[in-house]
Amino acid sequence: MGELDSVMVKEQPAYVAIESEVTGPVETIWEKAYRQDARYVAEVHGEQGWPVVVLYPEWENKPPTSPSRILVQLVLSTEINPDKLPDGRGEGLKVTAMPAATVVGCAYRGAYTFENFKKALARIEEYIKQKDLKPVGPPRHLYFSNTAWTPAFMRVSEVEVPIAGGAADTTSHP
């Protein structure tokens, strides 16, 4: 995760996650997918690593409209071998190995809302335009705080957009 309230380019490590796909109102569907994934993680892996990643695969420089399709991933590890986890345990769930990526990210503290996501994404898009960078994938929203005991105003998350490029510039840009 980057510095809070800063926009920065960084390398995101590869990771393995349990992923589910859901369609519905964009403001609420991530919770349904999260619960499906969490049951799988509890049964198969024993514990979940943070964060939860929400991907918007059909994003084309505009916010999704309802109903929308999202992918929700519960990150298990950056070191686990995905071949050692059984796939298909539950409707629509799969083990997904995500490659390392160079991303532009903006971390913030606050409620996990679509409005907060869009605000952080707007800052990222402005930075990408200023630096003449090339997005190479849809935006994603990483949730770092456990909602069971963290009040909404204290939750930490990060919005990221994968970009073309090599080594990350780890300098923050407020």
Image (cartoon, rainbow, N blue to C red):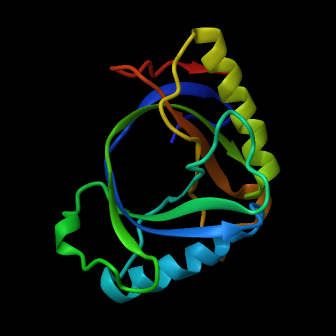
What residue occupies the far bottom of the structure in this picture?
43
Q: Nearer the viewer, residue 108 or 45?
A: 45
**In front here: 29 or 150?**
29
Residue 147 visible in the picture: no
| Rendering quarter of residue 8 | top right
- Residue 30 horizontal side relative to residue 154, left or right: left
- Residue 133 percent coordinates (x, y): 53, 16
User: Residue at horizontal 72%, vertical 27%?
Assistant: 123
Q: Residue at x 46, y 77 (%)?
A: 92
Asked if residue 34 is positioned above or below residue 136 in the image, the reply reads: below
* 20 to 6, vertically: above or below: below
Q: Closer to the camera, 24 or 170? A: 24
Is 95 displayed left or right of 162 in the figure?
left
Q: Is residue 85 or residue 154 the one in the foreground?
A: 85
Q: Quadrant of residue 40?
A: bottom left
Q: Is residue 35 visible?
A: yes
Q: Residue at x 62, y 27 (%)?
A: 7
Residue 75: x and y in percent read 41, 62
Q: In this view, does 71 lie above or below 13?
A: below
The C terminus - image quarter: top right
The residue at the point 63 percent across, 43 percent down is 59
Question: x and y percent of residue 31 in the render?
Answer: 66, 73
* Image spot of residue 54 (x, y percent): 57, 57
- Displayed quadrant of residue 62: top right
